[in-house]
Amino acid sequence: MNQTGRINPEQALAEHLPPLTSHEAIVEANRCLFCYDAPCTHACPTHIDVPRFIKKISTDNLIGSARTILDANLLGSTCARVCPVQELCEGACVLGSEHKPIMIGRLQRYAMDYVATRGIDVFQPGLPTGKHVAIVGAGPAGLSCAGNLARLGHSVTIFEKRELAGGLSTYGIIALREPVDASLAEVEMIKRLGVKVETGFDLGGNLPFTDLQKNFDAVFLSVGLGATPALNIPGEESIVDGLYYIEQSKINAATIKIGRNVVVIGAGNTAIDCATIAKRLGAERVTMVYRRTDKEMTAYPHEYEFVKNEGVEFRFLTQPISMVAGGLLCQQMSLGAPDASGRPSPEPVTGTDFILSADQVVKAIGQQKSSIAAQLGLTTEKGFIQVDQHFQTSIPGVYSGGDCIRAKGSASTVMAVEDGKLAAQSIHRKLTHG
Ligand SMILES: Cc1cc2nc3c(=O)[nH]c(=O)nc-3n(C[C@H](O)[C@H](O)[C@H](O)COP(=O)(O)OP(=O)(O)OC[C@H]3O[C@@H](n4cnc5c(N)ncnc54)[C@H](O)[C@@H]3O)c2cc1C
Ligand code: SF4
């Protein structure tokens, strides 16, 4: 709240974990057992040598610590903020069973903030190879691929359709976890490795694929996923798109419209973020509706706990039917036999329609697959771009990684970063050894 009694969006959505002080960081680093063959390193999808970077913090060698992190994960700053550490590195920490696990994410952020705030560039561009690589999409996968290729001396241009680079780190991840500035600072770090970032270029729109094939030695597609799918219910045009809601809260927070009584459709991490934004920016009541139960919801357990603590309410076994005057017409569901996803299928219970009152309804029910695969005629798997073990698509010389290839497993930033790194290694091998 500011002096006029209005909520200040920047304060309400400021990063919820404060940076560690140097005293806190050193005390925490000294708790680490520096395990041999450390489980945290195995649990990190980018395999950062966690005990090594923590050891360097304990001896106040923060540039060395940042180098250890960035060598495995060029987007170490974003990952330190957004990784679901409970499910990854910290979840594997041996101290977790009897004591508190080491705060690996926050220590990582401590080292990354040290170099970022001082403008220290840990790596330099490699010696020029004369090879040119085009990357489509400036999200975590594209930036990781670009930065690693630049370290190896290749000339890299990223084409991005939006005005700002960073992908979902800039536009999609709630500011509580990652503010826009943190994402853009990382983009600048990648640019200082010599990577060109051309925004306003849309592959399939004003950027012809044939131009990329003609002018570059290799192409990496990191286009992520698409828009929120349709619910196909009457009155849907008055439902707010959840991705747009989050984007507004990050980019245009001063003008975002928040209802007093908000209903969020969905129960994944995006829905949790929408509910959190509504609550933090002044909604009196926020209710999440989901057609299954809390056992089937896709949000991480710690996110579910977080949003319950924010005061968000839940209506499980509830299916939206249509928008009506005063809110959302819903129907009660029950769970039947497992469907194709392996989860019990929700089945309508007749005669249970009711109106859930709301003056704003937000839908956050996932993202559609990218249309790029169909446009380019690429082979797909469950609608995702199919790649081989070298991240090469069905078109030779065209590689892909990140959310757009994630046919298996759950999409996350750190997985996209790892794809970008491994694809860069494959592209480098191909360009230098044939
Ligand atoms: C709301 C939300 C919250 C999330 N929170 C977390 C979290 O807390 N932790 C976590 O680990 N993961 C989180 N994720 C997932 C994570 O953001 C993604 O897994 C990650 O961003 C994937 O990176 P990417 O580079 O593959 O795709 P993206 O980040 O989606 O980037 C793709 C880029 O490609 C561009 N693009 C698309 N099509 C074209 C085209 N035709 N031409 C040019 N450019 C194009 C897009 O504009 C975009 O910039 C969240 C996702 C969402 C939606
Ligand atoms: S990148 Fe993510 S998973 Fe890996 S060590 Fe850092 S915070 Fe943990």
Image: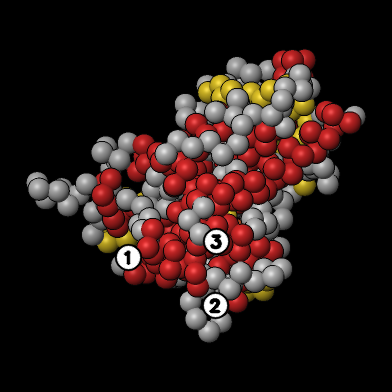
Q: Which mark is residue 54?
A: 3
Q: Which mark is residue 20?
A: none
Q: Is 373 rendered above or below residue 381?
A: above
- Badge 2 or badge 3: first in the primary sequence: 3
Quarter occupied by the C terminus: top right
Label 3: few (<14), some or many (≥20) within 10 Å? Answer: many
State left or right for residue 275 relative to residue 332.
Answer: left
Q: Nearer the viewer, residue 59 or 370?
A: 59
Name the residue rendered at 37%, 41% in the picture.
250
- Badge 1 or badge 3: first in the primary sequence: 3
Residue 127 pos. (x, y %): 71, 25
Marks 1 and 2, how far apart at CA: 26 Å
Closest to the camera, between mark 1 and mark 3, is 3
Residue 245 pos. (x, y %): 39, 44
Closest to the camera, between mark 2 and mark 3, is 3
Closest to the camera, between mark 1 and mark 2, is 2
Name the residue rendered at 66%, 25% in the picture.
156
State left or right for residue 299 relative to residue 203.
Answer: left
Marks 2 and 3, how far apart at CA: 17 Å
Q: Which residue is mark 2?
A: 96
Q: Which residue is mark 1?
A: 310
Q: Nearer the viewer, residue 192 or 280?
A: 192
Q: Amino acid at mark 1?
A: Glu
Label 1: few (<14), some or many (≥20) within 10 Å? Answer: some
Q: Amino acid at mark 3?
A: Ile
